[in-house]
Amino acid sequence: MVAAIEIRNLCKRYGTLEALSDISLSIRRGEFFGLLGPNGAGKTTLISIVAGLARADSGSVSILGHDVVRDFLSARRLLGVVPQELVFDPFFTVRETLRLQSGYFGLRKNDDWIDEVMHYLDLSGKADTNMRALSGGMKRRALIALALVHKPPVIVLDEPTAGVDVELRYALWQFIGRLNREEHTIVLTTHYLEEAQEWCSRIAMLQNGKIVALNTTDALVSRAAESRLILKVSHGEIPASLQSLLLASQAAYSADTRVFRITHHTEIEFILRTLREQGVDFHHVQLSQPDLEEAFLRIMEKRED
């Protein structure tokens, strides 16, 4: 099956800066895919090349089999991009802007879909409002609507919820989730890692223009992070048999807190039983599960070493 996005040996330089270095990546149709990395990792450069806004120095990108350079018209019709920056035409209303965008893609009589998009993004009440009169959150909603107005099978969301309120965030994810269930491919970049963990089935992590991790979300979390057993100790010392399980640095916790690394659930009962047998009094028992944020930080730190 043809991939939704196929990236092969992509390289991009800006002077002496190597923004992308031999990036190869295949994103499947209908996938909800995460593209994560610190600022300056190359995410925006990669998205710009995929969207046809920048040219790679070498390598290729195709959208559903259409090369973004050789067959750019077809590639761009298949792609919708929600940019991170608030870029808009200040001379038209929301509805006029969406109709013009439909016209760019040769779509006529698209009002039913425009109405549906505005409804799900809570823009209906602002349909006849000039774009420049919208608040920042409403402008963000309008940009999302612009990217979706031609029903693209591949959608790239570049920090879609940056600086928006909780209500919009909820409405957006409900709508995007529906599109993904209808087999639209979604590519997400975000600094809200809890969003990526909840929605993305696979994730690629970029650092210094290179892919440093690529796997399913669950695999990245389970391999790079670990569960922790957190106890408040009121009396006694941790016995030598448990010292190897203690977290190396406990500076982030209070003086009476002890944190144990857990690699298997059987270790929990072993730790608690050993502490009881050694007369260690403890309370406030908490099991902390690993998350994507911890995995991300560990992967980035490991690559910097």
Image (spheres, rainbow, N blue to C red):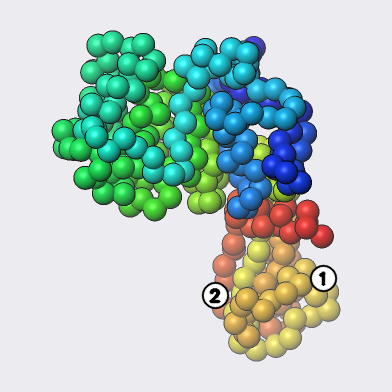
Seen in the picture, residue 30 relative to 35 is either above or below; the reply is above
Q: What residue type is labelled 2?
A: His
Front label number (1 vs 2): 1
Query: Outermost residue toward the bottom?
Result: 235
From this viewpoint, is residue 119 visible? no
Residue 216 or residue 117, whichever sits in front = 117
Helix or strand or loop: what does disc 2 sit on?
strand
Crowding around mark 1 (Cα neighbors within 10 Å: few <14, some 14 to 19, many 20+) is few
Left or right, residue 39 beside residue 103? right
Q: Is residue 192 left or right of residue 288?
A: left
For marks 1 and 2, the one nearer the N-term is: 1
Q: Which residue is drawn at 63% across and 85% down?
A: 255
In this picture, is 215 found above or below 2? Answer: below
- Check the picture and name the quadrant holding the N terminus: top right
Tell me which corner region of the image, top left, top right, bottom left or bottom right, holds residue 28.
top right
Horizontal and vertical percent position of residue 32: 54, 31
Given residues 93 and 170, the one toward you in this image is 93
Q: Splitting the image into 4 quarters, where does residue 107 fall?
A: top left
* Circle count: 2
Direction from residue 22 to residue 137 in the image, left or right: left
Q: Residues within 10 Å of mark 2 (few under 14, many from 20)?
A: few
Residue at 62% from the left image edge and 35% from the top image edge: 46
Which amino acid type corresponds to the residue marked 1 in the rendered image? Ser
Disc marking residue 244: 1
- Check residue 284 in the rendering and tell me which mark sits there, or answer none: 2
Q: Position of residue 210 (x, y in %)?
A: 74, 42
Q: Percent position (x, y) of residue 158?
A: 50, 40
- Residue at position x 30%, y 22% from top? 100
Question: Is residue 17 positioned above or below 5 on the image?
Answer: below
Residue in front for this viewpoint, 189 or 183: 189
Looking at the rendered structure, the secondary structure element under dot 1 is helix
Is the C terminus in the top left, top right, bottom left or bottom right quadrant? bottom right
